[in-house]
Amino acid sequence: MRGKIIITTKERYELTDITSEVEEIVKNNNLENGIITVFVPHSTAAILLTENEEGLKKDWIDFFKNLVAGKNFLHDRIDNNADSHLLSGLLGQGKVLPVKNKKIVRGTWQNIFLAEFDGPRERSVEVVVIS
Ligand code: ZN
């Protein structure tokens, strides 16, 4: 059981809330209890759980930019996106979430985001549903 979400990002760094799309996949697969994996098959994007609040989203973007600012990365000699790979690997490219009574178990401020670090691009997010 699985589902796929396609997101077209517009900025180089961008956070896109995909919680409702993931919930829809859980619903469509009739999962009552189990787990889901949410995975982005790209090495310059990540999956992040955080609050969907405009200020915090900007804080995250500033935080990411500050982490990699002013560095002389070797990979930039090849394709100028070392920052994208480093942030993607640091955050992680997938998450596992429990499902109980047909609902994803998550805190009020734990929305599921696709974190783009090398946009604009078309990204796919793979959701696997395991009962
Ligand atoms: Zn690269």
Image: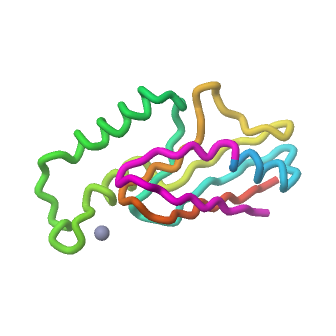
Query: Which residue sits at x=66%, y=33%?
Result: 106
Residue 128 location (% of width, % of height): 70, 59
Colour scheme: rainbow
- Disc tally is 0
Residue 61 location (% of width, % of height): 35, 39
Magenta residue span: 1-20
Rendering quadrant holding ligand 1? bottom left
Q: Is 100 contained in the magenta span?
A: no
In the rendered structure, the answer to whether residue 120 lies left or right of residue 39 reads: left
In the rendered structure, the answer to whether residue 1 lies left or right of residue 60 reads: right
**Front one among 18 and 108:** 18
Query: Which residue sits at x=39%, y=61%?
Result: 44
Query: Which residue sits at x=20%, y=67%?
Result: 75
Q: Is 5 contained in the magenta span?
A: yes
In the rendered structure, the answer to whether residue 62 lies left or right of residue 109 reads: left
Outermost bottom residue: 78
Query: Which residue sits at x=25%, y=61%?
Result: 82
Quadrant in the picture for the N terminus: bottom right
Residue 115 location (% of width, % of height): 46, 49
**Front one among 107 and 5:** 5
**Front one among 131 and 127:** 127
In the rendered structure, the answer to whether residue 55 lies left or right of residue 107 reads: left
Residue 16 location (% of width, % of height): 52, 46
